[in-house]
Image (cartoon, rainbow, N blue to C red):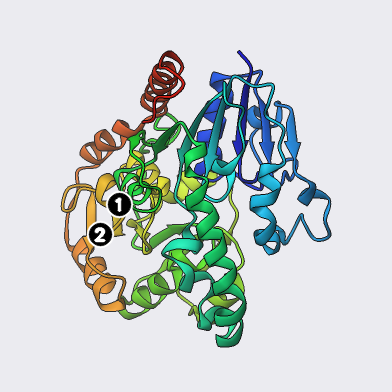
Amino acid sequence: MRVALVHDWLTGMRGGEKVLEELCGLYPDADIHTLFHMKGSVSQTIERHRVRTSFLQRLPLARTQYRRYLPLFPFAIEQFDLDAYDLVISSSHCAAKGAVTPGRARHICYCHSPMRYAWDQFDAYFGPARVGSVASRWIYRPMLARLARWDASTAGRVGRFVANSAHVAARIGRYYNREATIVYPPVDTVFYQPAAVSPERHFLIVSAFVPYKRIDLAIAACRRAGVGLRIVGDGPDRRRLAHIAGPDVAFLGRLTNEQIRDEYRRAHAVILAGEEDFGIVPVEAQACGRPVVALGLGGAVETVIDGETGVLFPEPAVESLTAALARVSAMSFDSERIRTHAETFSRDRHVHAMQRVIDETMAAPVEVRW
């Protein structure tokens, strides 16, 4: 059986790439098709595969500013020749699910999210505060409306949807009118474990610096609460965040997995200030025995147990998060209980669940829709 893995882009090891990594383990001879590939940016498990990129890879500034080519993503993903494959698995948060597959092939889409900026997070990326009112209204809104129409119209190319959370499954139903099987992403609960160190009084964020993560909200809340904040990561919002941060905020940049694990263990709690489709960071933190302060929307309500493994706050407002920081500081947590909960999202559970989905799909008649 010939297998193709289709992924939006390979520019770093985030949650989507960790799912792809497990698929690479299941199918070591599979070919990977992706819009962009920055060599060395992903794990060796992925790099060992034959990676085929789109024509966008050869355009100017593709390495550093690939998101500028967003309007071309649908056309580029449709150019991949997948006729030789029996099984196509797309790992999609943007355009990968729109790949064109032959009629005899099975297409399973592991959907991290329907295209966020085209559906319900337009303002976070392309609102007037981000790009100016004129560009937002006359350039980006029509462009994203076209992308949303394409995104909905290509849902029929997928034989079976797999969602990374119940939250995303609901969005798949809303925007694609399709059902989805829930398979939570893999979290390396063997690597992320507690250690015999005493937590310190600061809070921690591990995140890409993009608008919907709401790191600005966490900075403001920590300032109001008078507590320190350490931030791991980088991204296009770095300059803006550094401008609003005070002396109690430390930007640590990109760290190794070992360094991130150490940061988890030392933190009083880990903050998730924005709405996530799933959110691997809160589970990694809990695997290290540390509580999480998270917005009570999206995937966090599936991964954080309020009052047991962390604290959920009701709305993305400074006052709400500040109150949650005070609450978590006044509570005591059982690190073993937190750790046990995190183990329900282990890599082994993910792999077994995905293998079951694949086996069921390959055994079913081609015309069956899930």
What residue did someone put label 1 on? Answer: 300
Q: Amino acid at mark 2?
A: Gly
Q: Left or right? Give the position of 135 relative to 224.
A: right
Q: Left or right? Give the position of 130 relative to 306.
A: right
Quick check: can you spot residue 248? yes
Question: x%, y% of residue 119?
Answer: 44, 62
Residue drawn 55% across and 35% down?
90
Nearest the eye: 290 or 67? 67
What residue did someone put label 2 on? Answer: 296
**Vertical side of 355 occupied by 180: above or below:** below
Toward which corner of the image does residue 360 lie, by quadrant?
A: top left
Tags 2 and 1 in contact by the CB under 8 Å rule? Answer: yes
Q: Secondary structure at mark 2?
A: loop
Question: x%, y% of residue 2?
Answer: 64, 17
Between the residue at mark 2 and the residue at mark 1, the CA separation in whole angstroms equals 6 Å
Question: x%, y% of residue 184?
Answer: 36, 36
Q: Amino acid at mark 1?
A: Ala
Nearest the eye: 210 or 36? 36
Nearest the eye: 206 or 59? 59
Question: x%, y% of residue 243?
Answer: 56, 81
Residue drawn 26% across and 70% down?
315
Task: Locate the N terminus and report the quarter of the image it occupies.
Answer: top right
Badge 1: residue crowd in 10 Å (few <14, some 14–19, many ≥20): many
Task: Locate the C terminus and report the quarter of the image it occupies.
Answer: top left
Q: Secondary structure at mark 1?
A: helix
